[in-house]
Image (cartoon, helix red, strand yellow):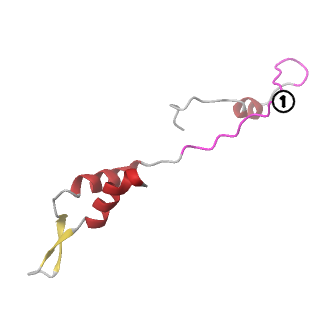
Amino acid sequence: MEHCREGVEALRQYQREYDEDKKTFRQSPRHDWTSHPADAFRMLAIAWREEPKIARPDPDKQLYVGDQNQATLNDIWSSYKPNRSTRL
C-alpha cells in the first residue's frame, strides 16, 4: 500500500466547488493537484474489465477426427487456448 499513498490521498482530497449563491455544487470539480490522479482513477474504473475465465481442456482427453472417437465441436472449442491479447 506504500506505493499507493499519494494516489489514495489525492482521492481523499478531491473536491467539487460549492456555489454559495445557488446553494449547490458546481458542474466542474475544483482543479488542483488532485485532479489528475482522480481523473486517472475514473478512467481506470470505466475501462477495467476482468480477464475472462477460460476453462482449460482436460489433458487426458484426446481429439480425434477419424471414424472412431470423433471430436465434437464443443470438444474442439474447449481445447482452444487464446493468447492474452485476444479479447472476447
The residue closer to the viewer here, 23 or 40, is 40
Q: Work out whether 48 lies above or below 28.
A: above
Tell me if 45 is positioned left or right of 79 in this view. left
- State the residue at coordinates (15%, 82%): 23
The residue closer to the viewer here, 20 or 77, is 20
Q: Work out whether 7 lies above or below 26.
A: above
Q: Quadrant of the N terminus?
A: bottom left
Which residues fall within the magenta stretch? 51-69
Q: Position of residue 76 (x, y in %)?
A: 73, 29
Quarter of the rendering containing residue 54: top right
Quarter of the rendering containing residue 84: top right
- State the residue at coordinates (55%, 43%): 51
Q: Work out whether 71 lies above or below 38.
A: above
Residue furthest front as drawn: 2
Q: Quadrant of the C terminus?
A: top right
Tell me if 39 is positioned left or right of 45 in this view. left
Tell me if 73 is positioned left or right of 86 in this view. right
- State the residue at coordinates (72%, 34%): 78
The residue closer to the viewer here, 36 or 83, is 36
Residue at the disc numbered 1:
61
Q: Is residue 45 visible?
A: no
